[in-house]
Image: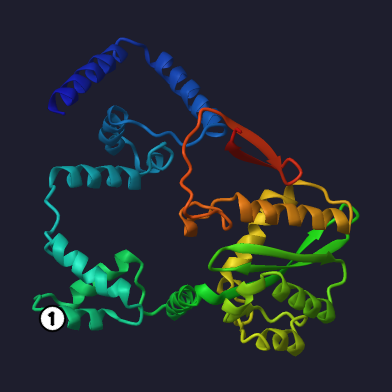
Amino acid sequence: MLVQMIYLLATRTFAWLALLCRSTPAKNAEILILRHEVTVLRRQVTPPKPAWPDRAPLAALARLLPQRLRGHRIVPPRTLLAWHRRLVKQKWTQPPPPGHPPVPDELHDLIIRPGTDNSPWGSRRVHGELRRLGYKVSAATARRVLPATGFRPRQRRQAAHHEWTTFLKAQANGLLTTDFSHIDTIGLQRQYALSVMEVRTRTAHILGATAHPTAARATQHARQLLRQPGDRAATFTHLIRDRDPKFTATFDTIFASKGITVTKIPPRNPNRNPHAERFIRSVREESTNRVLTFDRGHAEKIRQEHACHFNTHRPHQAHDQRAPLDDPNVIPLPTARIERRKAVAGLINEYRHAA
């Protein structure tokens, strides 16, 4: 920095000495021209960002100008003061304060474990559990570590969501979930269909399509559904549905006659029915939003073909990337030839071993 300043001072000094050889009228004419150029440039360019070789002469010569001329420079006095504060900050540096000592990795993992395994627990409860285990840790450390894992003790809605997820996992073996979805045809007529999913196997069922869904039709679909699974109907224990008025007491009675308890999700909480909502989203993103449907028959055909693809070919993470109807005892082996087959009106590609 010192060498740069000496070089800059020398070049500027020789340049200013060259000005002494010029006449006063020439200097005055140049000043008038430069002032006019500055005025023109200020109207069409953004504020300049001078580098430090430009800032040094401006800061040194600004003190020699009269008070009334200092406000007309490209660099106002507050900028000069800011430059000075920046130089002071760069010279007088000091290391940051040490702060809290780092938490050992073993203790860090031990704080996270009870906080994630027990959603109702707060930081105080986690701290007490650690103290009972003989670890000397403060409550402030537990409060600082737990939020890094997404733990928010004051967000009760998140805890409720975790409780609902735990309930769904515990009841998955006998759980059914249902919801209505719609498709808008090319004639702007909306076609509705009732979809039902067996949560344990992820098997989906599409129960008809109609432009005028009614409570009587939903009840008829419920009877149709309980006839489809055959012997599996006896394994179902719960049905999750929303509060659509088409789901009447008669609809619930049909399932109750088979020993299936109907559970209604809270109002305006589609996340409490995640499996049905996710299936409907898959149908829309992979099929119905990519094709124009002509009438009710076309809409029902697209849905049924997608349900067939969903059940027989589409992999699911919950089933180790197997389709719902795949045999878990069959281990696929790689082959030399793979063939592609179009499904769902050519919208989806299915890949199988060539015969």
Give the answer, above or below, for where 321 lies relative to 38: below
Residue 309 position, x and y percent, is 66, 51
Number of dots carrying numbers: 1
Q: Quadrant of residue 84?
A: top left
Residue 43 shows in the view: yes
Q: Quadrant of the C terminus?
A: top right
Q: Is residue 25 left or right of residue 178?
A: left
Question: Mark 1 belongs to which amino acid?
Answer: Arg
Instruction: Place residue 68 in its image quadrant.
Output: top left
Residue shown at 57%/81% (left/top)?
237
The residue under the point 51% across, 25% down is 37
Residue 328, horizontal then vertical, whole percent? 48, 55
Element type at mark 1: helix
**Quadrant showing the N terminus:** top left
Residue occupying the far top of the picture: 21
Residue at (57, 34) in percent of width and height: 43
Report the colour scheme: rainbow
**Residue pictured at 68% horizontal, 84% vertical:** 255
Question: Is residue 103 at least partly visible in the picture?
Answer: no
Q: Position of residue 80 (x, y in %)?
A: 30, 42
**Near-viewer residue (113 or 96):** 113
Check disc 1: other Cα within 10 Å, few if <14, some if 14-19, many if 20+: some
Residue 176 percent location from the top left of the image: 61, 74
Looking at the image, residue 82 sits to the left or right of residue 228; the answer is left
Q: Which residue is mark 1?
A: 131
- Front residue (pair 123, 310): 310
Q: As drawn, is 79 to the left or to the right of 220? A: left
130, 169: nearer the viewer: 169
Relative horizontal placement of residue 330, taking residue 79 as reference (left or right): right
